[in-house]
C-alpha cells in the first residue's frame, strides 16, 4: 500500500491542464479563467455624477443660478458650465466641462429655470474618471469565475473569456447487484447511488460528467462499457477493483492496455483504490462501498479535476477546527471520518461504516486522522475537509 500523498503524486504526474476555449460571458459562470482579462477603457470612462442634482462651478449657499440644460445617463450636456450657471444632472450622467460639484436636489429650491442654493455639502458628489478601475486593469488567471467576476469583466468591456475546456469524465458503475434509481430491484439487488453522487460532485467542480450504463460482472459487459469511454479525459470506475472472484475491473483494464500506477492506499475508507493510464485517459478505480467512493471522490478525483482545469496540482484544501469530544487513537491507516462542524466544534459521528450514506448525508466534514494519531481531547485542533 502507498500513502494518500503518494497516491496523489502518482495522479498528478499523469495529469496536465487541458486546452482552452473562448466562451461568452453568459456561459462563463463556474469556468476556470486561463488567460488574463484587460479593461479596454476606464470605469467610469468619464467623471460621473454620484447623485441627482445640479452640476455647478464654485458656488456658495445663497447663490441664485439659471439652469441652462440637462445631463442624463447616456446623454451628456455638451457645453461648458461657467461660474453662475447650473445644469440639471442625474446619477451616472457625465459631469459637464467646467462643473466641479454636484449640489443634490434636496439642497436647492427651484422655481422655473432658476435654483437657489440652500446649502453646500462638503463632498462634491462626483465620481472621477477611472474611479473603479483604469484602462488596462487586469483580472489575473487562473481563477474560478463567479458572478462578481463576470460583472467586472463585462464592465471591462470584454464580451468573452478564455477558459479551460471542461474535462470529460466517464463514470462507470459495475456489478450484477446494481439497478438504477426508479427501477424495481430484484431480491438480491441494490440501487446504484455512488454514480449519482460522483456525477453531482464532478459537475459542481466544472467537469462534463457522463453516466455510462451499469457494467455487469462479465468480461464482455465490461469491455462493452469501456468502449463507451472513448474521448474521455478521465475514466472513473466504481466497484470491481478488489480481489474477489467477481471483481474483474483490474483484469479487464489490464487486458485493454491500462498501465497501472498503483493499487491500494493506506486509508479508511477507500483502501482498494486503483489508478493508471488507459490510452489518452487517466483512470481511477474507486471502491464499491458508497461512502468509500464518495470519500475518494473528494480526496482524489476532485484534486485531479482541479488540476485538469489549470487550478494547480494540490491536495484538497484542509481546514482546522476544535474537537467537540474526546476521540480514541487512530490505527495504521489515514482515516477520513464523517463529522459535523457545529457551534461547539467538530463532532465525529459514532457510526463510521463505509456503507452508511445516511451518516455521510448528515455530515458536512471529513475529519482527518493521520496514521498512528494519538488519542485526542475535546478542545484539540484537528484537520478536516469540508464536504
Image: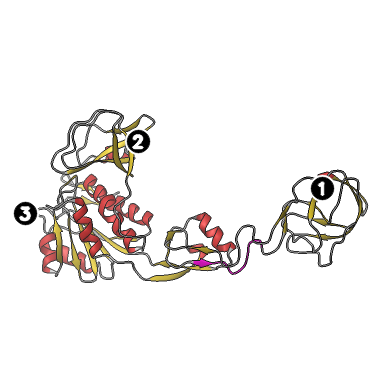
Check disc 2 and report its element: helix, strand or loop: strand
Mark 3 burial class by Cα count in 10 Å: few <14, some 14-19, many 20+: few
Q: Earlier in the sequence, mark 2 or mark 1?
A: 1
Which mark lies nearer to you, 1 or 3? Answer: 1
Disc 3: which residue: 245
| Residue at point 39%, 31% (across, down) | 343
In the image, 374: left or right of 364?
Answer: left
Q: Dots 2 and 3: beta carbons under 8 Å?
A: no
Q: From this viewpoint, is residue 183 visible?
A: no
Residue 249 percent across, percent down from the top left: 14, 60
**Residue that numbered label 2 is attached to:** 341
Q: Which residue is mark 1?
A: 105
User: Between residues 50 and 130, which one lies in front from this camera angle?
Assistant: 130
Dot 2: within a 10 Å radius of its alpha carbon, few (fewer than 14), some, or many (20 or more) residues? many
C-alpha separation, residue under disc 2 versus residue under disc 3:
40 Å
Callout 3: SS: loop
Q: Is residue 13 above or below residue 125?
A: below
Q: Quadrant of residue 233?
A: bottom left
- What range of the chain is rendered magenta? 37-44
* 199 falls in the magenta region: no
Question: Where residue 231 sits in the image (x, y, percent)?
Answer: 28, 70
Gap between marks 1 and 3 measured at Cα: 84 Å
Horizontal and vertical percent position of residue 17: 33, 66
Q: Which one is nearer the viewer's eye here, 6 or 148?
A: 6
Distance between mark 2 and mark 1 Cα atoms = 52 Å
Badge 1 density bin: few <14, some 14–19, many ≥20, Cα 10 Å? some
Amino acid at each position: 500500500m502507498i500513502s494518500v500523498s503518494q497516491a496523489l503524486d502518482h495522479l498528478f504526474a499523469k495529469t496536465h491542464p487541458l486546452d482552452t476555449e473562448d466562451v461568452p460571458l453568459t456561459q462563463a459562470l463556474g469556468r476556470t479563467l486561463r488567460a488574463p482579462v484587460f479593461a479596454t477603457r476606464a470605469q467610469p470612462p468619464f467623471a460621473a455624477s454620484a447623485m441627482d442634482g445640479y452640476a455647478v462651478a464654485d458656488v456658495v449657499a445663497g447663490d441664485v443660478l439659471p439652469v441652462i440644460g440637462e445631463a442624463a445617463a447616456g446623454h451628456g450636456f455638451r457645453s461648458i458650465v461657467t461660474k453662475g450657471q447650473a445644469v440639471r444632472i442625474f446619477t451616472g450622467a457625465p459631469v459637464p466641462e467646467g462643473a466641479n460639484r454636484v449640489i443634490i436636489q434636496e439642497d436647492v429650491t427651484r422655481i422655473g429655470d432658476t435654483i437657489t442654493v440652500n446649502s453646500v455639502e462638503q463632498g462634491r458628489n462626483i465620481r472621477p474618471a477611472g474611479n473603479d478601475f483604469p484602462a488596462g486593469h487586469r483580472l489575473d488567471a487562473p481563477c474560478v469565475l463567479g458572478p462578481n467576476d463576470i460583472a467586472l469583466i463585462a464592465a471591462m468591456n470584454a464580451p468573452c473569456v478564455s477558459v479551460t475546456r471542461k474535462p470529460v469524465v466517464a463514470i462507470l458503475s459495475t456489478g450484477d447487484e446494481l439497478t438504477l434509481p426508479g427501477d424495481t430491484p430484484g431480491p438480491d439487488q441494490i440501487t446504484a447511488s455512488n454514480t449519482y453522487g460522483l456525477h453531482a460532485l464532478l459537475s459542481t467542480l466544472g467537469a462534463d460528467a457522463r453516466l455510462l450504463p451499469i457494467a455487469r460482472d462479465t468480461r464482455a459487459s465490461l469491455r462493452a462499457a469501456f468502449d463507451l469511454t472513448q474521448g474521455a479525459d478521465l475514466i472513473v470506475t466504481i466497484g470491481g477493483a478488489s480481489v474477489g472472484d467477481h471483481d474483474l475491473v483490474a483484469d479487464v483494464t489490464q487486458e485493454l492496455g491500462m498501465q497501472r500506477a498503483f493499487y491500494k492506499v493506506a486509508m479508511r475508507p477507500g483502501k482498494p483504490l486503483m489508478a493508471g493510464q488507459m490510452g489518452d485517459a487517466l483512470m481511477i478505480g474507486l471502491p464499491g462501498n458508497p461512502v468509500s467512493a464518495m470519500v475518494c471522490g473528494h480526496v482524489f478525483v476532485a484534486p485531479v479535476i482541479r488540476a485538469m482545469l489549470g487550478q494547480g496540482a494540490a491536495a484538497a484544501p484542509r481546514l482546522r477546527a476544535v474537537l467537540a469530544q474526546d476521540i480514541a487513537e487512530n490505527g495504521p491507516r489515514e482515516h477520513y471520518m464523517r463529522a459535523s462542524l457545529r457551534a461547539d466544534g467538530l463532532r465525529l459521528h459514532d457510526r463510521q461504516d463505509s456503507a452508511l450514506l445516511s451518516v455521510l448525508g448528515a455530515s458536512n466534514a471529513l475529519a482527518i486522522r493521520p496514521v498512528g494519531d494519538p488519542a485526542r481531547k475535546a478542545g484539540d485542533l484537528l484537520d478536516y475537509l469540508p464536504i
